[in-house]
Image (cartoon, grey):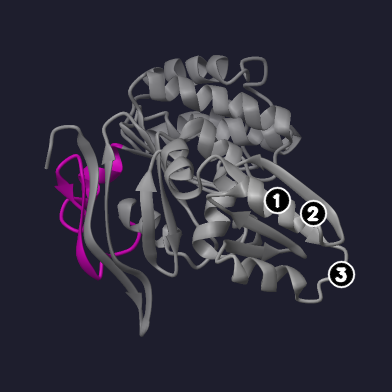
Amino acid sequence: MAPSCFVKGDEVVKKYGDFTAVDHVSFSVKRGECFGFLGPNGAGKTSIMRMIQCFAPVTEGSITVDGMRVGTHDREIKSVLGVVPQDDNLDHDLTVIQNLVIYAGYFGISKSNALKRSYKLLEFFHLSDRPDIPIRELSGGMRRRLTIARSIINEPSLLILDEPTTGLDPQVRRVIWRKLASLKEDGVTMILTTHYMEEASRLCDRIAIMDNGKILDVGTPDKLVRERLGDTVIEFAPSVDNGETSKLLDALNEKYETAGGAFFIFSKEPDDVFKKLADIKHTTLEKRSATLEDLFLNMTGHHLREGA
């Protein structure tokens, strides 16, 4: 394994009885990068995350973290991990500082050192004025920031983030993005799952798009969009869907997907297609820059959040 490769999966299979959740996938996460798994529920991304965390055994193939094999060196791997689960797992009977200090004890960190780290993290996440506040009195955004703070109390080299900003308002989401970007600058390797396309674009150096247990493609968000879709997508919603639009696009041999009564056309000749569509009665007809959401729709046939 190359020195720059921190997490590596080789022909990984995960089965639950007769059901194959992960089907012979291979991937590598470079040291210091943020790598994202994107896909709807059932795509297999959560199973991969659980295997990396040593929470679920690998059925076939192998996963290594910093050269240590999952299933063989689980204790050593867990010692270098930080995990941010999707759900709030804070102890609501304790205060902010108690949540951090007690959690630090699980890693053998002394109380004095735990307190020092805790106050530093509270400062970093703008919670320094609330150390003695009960968890139940914190807002959702504050609890999420505290959850991330607690996940790095052991100064992990790998941070696992499962839907880190789900349910938060846009302003709080952006605060967390800035903090995660700062952690990455400090050299922390990150693996995340998300349903927010802007989150993936802002945080991830590379992404793996998954569906039905397989990785469909891997690359930087911008490169994948550019290579697969080009620069332009046409979004078209006919006034009445009587089959006229699909007949036209099929006759032109154009690649398209449908969602929510609209057609999303991925054309190499968008100007020509745009002119032809203008002759059909419509409520929406626009050309716009291709996005990561368009890429996901193009590759899987549905919007990412439809599978949430």
State yes or no: residue 75 in magenta: yes
Location of residue 267 with respect to 43 vertically, above or below: above
- The residue lying toward the viewer, choosing from 80 and 20, is 20
Residue 2, position as x, y percentages in the image: 12, 37
Spatial separation of the CA atoms under disc 3 and disc 2: 14 Å
Foreground: 140 or 204?
204
Going 62% across and 21% down the picture, which residue do you hit? 131
User: Regarding mark 3 in the picture, which secondary structure is present there?
Assistant: loop
Query: Which residue position is annotated with label 1?
Result: 274
Q: Could you tell me residue 82's position as x and y percent?
A: 39, 38
Residue, disc 2: 278
Front disc: 3 or 1: 1
Which of the two discs, 3 and 2, sits closer to the camera?
A: 2
* Labelled disc at residue 46: none
Position of 137 compared to 93: left or right? right
Magenta stretch: give its range: 55-80
Name the residue that disc number 3 marks: 240
From where the camera sits, is residue 99 visible?
no
Is residue 21 part of the magenta span, yes or no? no
Indicate left or right for 17 with 176 as reference: left
Mark 3: amino acid: Val
The residue closer to the viewer here, 165 or 139, is: 165
Q: Residues within 10 Å of mark 2 (few under 14, many from 20)?
A: some
Q: Is residue 273 visible?
A: yes
Q: Is residue 281 left or right of residue 112?
A: right
| Figure check: 1 above or below 295 | above
Marks 3 and 1, Cα distance to the nearest angstrom? Answer: 18 Å
Q: Locate the C terminus by quadrant.
A: bottom right
Q: Return the disc, 3 or 1, that comes first in the chain's sequence.
A: 3
Task: Give the crowd class for mark 1: few <14, some 14-19, many >=20 residues within 10 Å.
Answer: some
